[in-house]
Each structure stands twice: as C-alpha cells, then as structure tokens.
Image (cartoon, grey):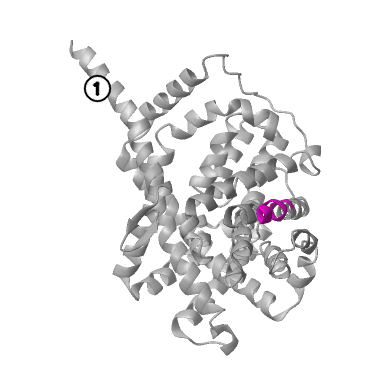
Amino acid sequence: MENSNAASQAHSRNYFRLFGLSALGVFIFFIPISFNGKTSIPLDHLVSLLKSWLGSGTSWYAMAMILAGAIYPLFTKSWRQSTTDTVFLGLKWLGVIAAIFAITGTGPQALQSPDMLPFLFNKLVISVGLIVPIGSVFLAFLVSYGLLEAIGILVQKLMQPIWRTPGRSAIDAVASFVGSYSIGLLITNRVYTAGQYSAREAAIIATGFSTVSATFMIIVAKTLGLMELWNVYFWATLLITFIVTAITVRLPPLSTMDDQAQHREPECEPGNRMRTALDTGLTVAEQAPSLGKSIVENFRDGLIMTISILPSIMSVGLIGLLVAKYTPVFDWLGMVFYPVTLIWGLEDGMALARASAAGLAEMFLPALLMTEASDIARFAAGVVCVSSVLFFSASIPCILATRIPLTVAKLVIIWLIRTMLSLFLAIPTAMLLLG
C-alpha cells in the first residue's frame, strides 16, 4: 500500500512538473498582462520593477557586468584558444573603456551624442544586463521539465522533410528561442560530437535555429516600440526565421556539406506519437533536478552569458554605430538589399537596407538604427535582427568555437542569404499585420 501511494505521488509530481511548471514558464514569457498602466509579458514587468528599484544603481551594475566579462576570459584562459578569442578579448576591454565613458560622460565628444554611447548604454546594455539573468531564472520552468522534449517528438515528422534535420533538433531550435543561441549551440555541438548529427545537420541547426532568445527579442521589441504587438512580433519572427532556414538548407554552402552521421535517430512508431511525446516529457520531468537546483544552474548560465555578451555589445555595437554614422560602408553593403525593399515600395527602404547590413556586426544595430522609422520598417527591422541569426559580436565566434565545420566565409555567405530572404518575407508580413 505504501509503495502504491509513493508511486502515485511520484506520478502526480511528474505531471505537475511537466504541465504545471512548464505552464508557468509559458506564462512568464508569452502571456501579456496589464500592470501599472502598461500591457506586456510578466518578464518585462519584472525587469521594469527591478530597474525602478535600482534607480541609478543600474548603471553601476551594468559596469560591473562589463568589467567581469572582460576579466572572465583571463581567469578561464579561454582567450588563448584561438585568434578569434584573442581579438574578442581586446574588444571586451574596449567595451570597458566605452562603458566608463558612458557613465562618466567623458571621452571624445562625438561619443556623447544622444544616439551614441548614451543610447547604447542606457537603452540597450542596461536592459540586456537585467533581462538575461532574470529571464534565465524563469527558463528553469520552460526548459527543464520535459516540455521541449515532448515538443521534439510531436514535430519529428516536420523536421526531416522541411528542414532536413532529425526530430531531436526541434529541442535545439526551441532552446535557442527560449534560452539563447549559446544554449542551442552547446546542445548542437554535444550531439554532433556524439555522432548523432551529420556535419550538414549541425551546420543547419547552428546557422538556422540558434538565433537570439526570447529575452533578447524583448529588448529588440522595446527598442523599436513593438511591445504592444509582442505576441504578433514574436510568432511572426519565429515563423519567418524557420521559413528562411527551410530555404537556405537547399542552397549552397549548406546543401553541399557532408551528411553522414554515425547514429541516426530512430523513427517513432506510427499512431503512438502523442503517447510517446507524453511519456518522454514525463520521463524528463522525473529525471530533472529539483526546481531550486534548476534555477541556480540557469541563473549561473544567465550571468555567464550576460558578462560574456555585454562588453561585446558595448564595443562592437559602438563601432557599428560609428561606422554607420560616419562612413558609407553600410550604405555600400545596404545596396545589396535595397532591391528587396524597392520591390515592395517601402517607405524608409534604403534606411532599412542599410540597417539590415549593419546587423552583420551586431544583431541589435538594425533596431538601433530604425527607432524613428515607419511602423512597417521598424517591424521588418525587428524581424531581420533575429532571422538573420549570424553576427560578429557573438553568434559567429560561438559557432567558430564549436567542432562544427563552418568557416567565416561560409558564415558570411549564409548571413547574406538569410538577410535577403528575411527582408523579402518580413516586409509584406508587416504590411499585412500592420496595414
């Protein structure tokens, strides 16, 4: 009798973990509520409350995170691993200097104009510095208790014909959107080195699914004034990102990569998909660590990500803004994308093409450069920020640090194709949704 009661309690606990805790994660990230006269998702409200409570202390908090991010590679000696890591160590320390200028108001006067350091530091760096670690706490509810694995089983039949990847890659895709590209890349690299992905499959996932997280998308939406359309923006961006990936996998250089894998994924038995998905989710929920441990681990990962990316945003973002303002580089590169905006007769078409080109340096730059544009152009810029996936301030170095056989040249070609396709789809989508 006691054994029966214990089994029943364990069964109930697993169901609660899978459905109850996962539902709380969905609520935190996706369900808009009204609070203090503002309608947004709960995570955004929490960040706003913390920012209000900290006041001017948010600047010093961000400064501490940036300094920690510059010191961390020295502490772990990771800066010695490659030339890219060494270059980014220098950029992180440049970010420290830029942050000092931003807080103290010193340095070259050109950097203190409202659209330079003040905008970059106050509107972007502080927001990212708060939202990523707070968001990582609640990721424990979304990613730790079987929801992702159950979704992977349910979409198995979609992944191979559409994206030419195994069903388990859905976990990577969702983990990137609700967690971060670094989490997605970590999963992808582990599965690839275990022989369960081919080189082509790993490259497709790394360049097509491992985009910025929902928490970063909130920053983009806030910067562009799209939070009132958060759910529309989020789901449209997710859909466009995956459509673009479905196209790029059929084009070089991805289509020509080696597709041999040692251990292929077994097929789910016909007619049992829902049952298998439920059983898989419950098994993961049963084996998952305690909620407290999951929160601590996710928070730790969130802090490491925060200190890793803030210095790069500060330095590469500033360099990108300076290049955009004082040189014609992005005008030239933007001409590649201008025919796409011209097709749709878009207002601010050249500005959007130029901003999209700037996304190669830092994914936030299209949003930063389009804050004053028309509604349709802002929406399209917000989609391109995410759907282009690849950028030099973070995701490209992360991919190069894995065992996945992708070169800088291949990554730039893939970025060019993705950005072109993203613009082609985002503009009419924005016209349809906002018209």
Residue 388 appears in the figure: no
| Residue farthest along the top direction in this orientation | 1
Crowding near the residue tagged with mark 1, few <14, some 14–19, many ≥20 C-alpha atoms within 10 Å? few
Residue matched to label 1: 9
> Where 227 sits versus 214, above or below?
below
> Where 335 sits versus 386, above or below?
below
Check the picture and name the quadrant holding the C terminus. Answer: bottom right
**Number of numbered callouts drawn:** 1
Can you give x and y, in whole percent of width and height, for residue 176 in the image? 54, 45
- Magenta region includes residue 89: no
Check the picture and name the quadrant holding the N terminus. Answer: top left
Tell me what residue is drawn at x 49 percent, y 56 percent: 229
Tell me what residue is drawn at x 61 percent, y 18 percent: 267
Tell me what residue is drawn at x 61 percent, y 31 percent: 194
Query: Which quarter of the figure has residue 34?
Result: bottom left
Can you give x and y, in whole percent of width and height, for residue 47 in the image? 37, 61
Q: Provide the residue span drawn in magenta.
A: 421-428
Q: Is residue 71 left or right of residue 130?
A: right
> Where 264 sits versus 380, above or below?
above
* SS at circle 1: helix
| Residue farthest along the front direction in this orientation | 435
- Magenta region includes residue 426: yes
Query: Which quarter of the figure has residue 90?
Result: bottom right
> Where 311 sits versus 34, above or below?
below
For the stretch drawn in magenta, the main secondary structure is: helix
Tell me the kind of residue under disc 1. Gln
Can you give x and y, in whole percent of width and height, for residue 99 in the image? 49, 76
Tell me what residue is drawn at x 38 percent, y 28 percent: 287
Residue 411 appears in the figure: yes
